[in-house]
Image: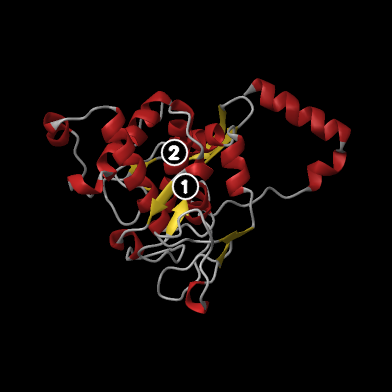
Amino acid sequence: MQSIDQEVRRRIQSNPRLLYQTTPKVSSNYWAVFDGSKQSFIHGKREYMRREIASLTKMMTAYTIIELCKQYKLKLAHIRIEICSVAANIRGTSAKLRKGDVLSAEQLMYGMMLPSGNDAAFALAKYFGKLLFDRKGYGEKDIQRIRSYQFNYHPYYVKYFLKQMNDNAVALKMTSSNFDSPHGLMNIQNQSTAYDMARLASKAMGSPTFRKVVGTKNYVCHPFRRQEMAKKPRQNSEMEPRTIQINDWDNGEGEKQPVSLIE
């Protein structure tokens, strides 16, 4: 804290007008400020109180995918994922995906982080959950051992991805977090704190891939059908490429939603 006070004094001495600036008002009841360069906590309010974190969950989903690609030497742009009916029909914020769409994992990352697509998050979690199930050689005992409150159904493979999310939380010392969803949609078991999520955001922003995705304002996506895979984009008017914009936060009922902050 002493070093922070010294920094404040230094800035005021170099620019006295800072003394007359009003303090920014924070309306949230739970928030935390982290120094990204030093990975250190600065200040907060009720920062250790656990609560459901909704779409902030997607930060850990994205971080986990990036780490898995590093571990298994995969490239997001080279992975093709077909959208299943479960993903296409998930309610809430959406990337407007349709059953049978085939997109790269990179495209789905944008679909998850820009419009906060629950559909894209589920599709990614299912794919990488299956990848983990195969790569780690999980057997019948593991199917029973690894459990999820909301995604325990084995054929989804999502619960294996959730386990990896929680393993990453432990590695990042997010001691008050439990991830039970890849998208954060209404799940009382999916909880964290402002402190833990600020720590995660600080760590995730150290990834060039993460920074590139969340720093993008507009992204044009060209989905493929199964038979087209990596050949050509859709041709007829019903299958034209769709634009995903960072300010298109829709709750599925035509209402725009504000962007979630680290609160």
Q: Nearer the viewer, residue 71 or 205?
A: 71
Q: Quadrant for residue 96, please give it.
A: bottom left
Secondary structure beneath dot 1 equals helix
Mark 1 lies on residue: 105
Q: Amino acid at mark 1?
A: Ala
Q: Amino acid at mark 2?
A: Ile
Horizontal side, residue 254 vs residue 125: left or right: right
Q: Position of residue 23 (x, y in %)?
A: 68, 47
Q: Position of residue 222 (x, y in %)?
A: 54, 61
Q: Quadrant of the N terminus?
A: top right
**CB within 8 Å, label 2 to label 1:** yes
- Which residue is depicted at the point 33% across and 37% down? 131
Q: Nearer the viewer, residue 261 or 227?
A: 227
- Which residue is depicted at the point 58% across and 64% down? 247
Secondary structure beneath dot 2 equals helix
- Which residue is depicted at the point 53% across and 52% down? 110
